Amino acid sequence: MTPKRALVVRGGWEGHQPVEATDLFLPFLRSNGYTVRVEESTGVYADAAEMAGTDLVVQCVTMSQITREELAGLSAAVVAGTGFTGWHGGIADSFRASSDYLHLVGGQFATHPGKEPCERRGGAEDNFLPHTIALTEAGREHPVTAGIEDFELHTEQYWVLHDDLIDVLATTTHPTRPWEPWHRPVSSPAVWTRRWGSGRIVVTTPGHSVDVLENPNVRTIIERGMLWATRTASVS
């Protein structure tokens, strides 16, 4: 059997620990039969031959920029069947200036609401809130999330702008708060899949830091998402 090929692309804003975060999943990939190539920039996306032979791209690049050629290479690979997955800002807050990238993934980080202003001290913890990741009916049946019950996190809670071509497996709800401007609770997708050409995309929004990625539910979803997104002989 030909080994599956995974490409891990990492970089961007260091606050999301792209090296430590992706290193956490390398043993899983290798133990599941993948040969793994790790790249510290998106330049590899413009290598058509490399991308054509890649079965799965795991991206952890927050913010940053992508060239037209790199994005065209990534998009063409996904359309042709290469899987694409990642977590938190490494996939949902990448390349803000590229509308075509946003179109590819189907959802974009907008904000992460914070604590009451008088409780903020200027650190990342200002945006750590207790919240629930709630499975949808589709999520309770999907291979990526089946068997996982609703669970609680205390970390950044992503508010995501999205389209309706995504299949939402889990949501999280932002409540109204006296210091915030919205007037009713707002639900955002927390885990979703997307079919794009022959490719499969999985986005998991929890994952601000390694300790969140080590949460058993979060880690299980990400690892299952890698397996599910990987190129298959036939898409079902």
Image (tube, grey):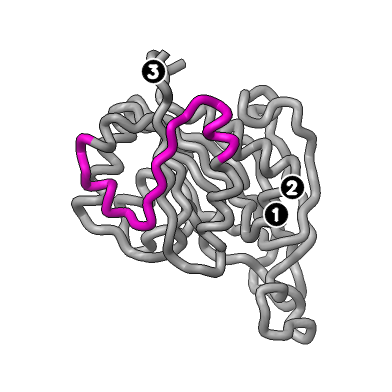
> For residue 215, which numbered disc appears in the image?
2
SS label for mark 3: loop
Image quadrant containing the N terminus: top left
Task: Name the residue carrying label 1.
Answer: 212
Task: Name the residue carrying label 3.
Answer: 2
SS label for mark 2: loop
Total marks placed: 3
Return the x and y of residue 162 as percentages of the image width and height. 48, 49
Find the magenta span and give its range.
27-49
| Looking at the image, residue 178 lies above or below residue 208 | below
**Which residue sits at x=70%, y=26%?**
146
Q: Name the amino acid, label 3.
A: Thr
Return the x and y of residue 46 as percentages of the image width and height. 22, 47
Return the x and y of residue 56 as percentages of the image width and height. 42, 34
Which tag is nearer the camera, tag 3 or tag 2?
3
Q: Name the amino acid, label 1.
A: Val
Residue 110 or residue 5, whichever sits in front: 5
**Which residue sits at x=44%, y=55%?**
10
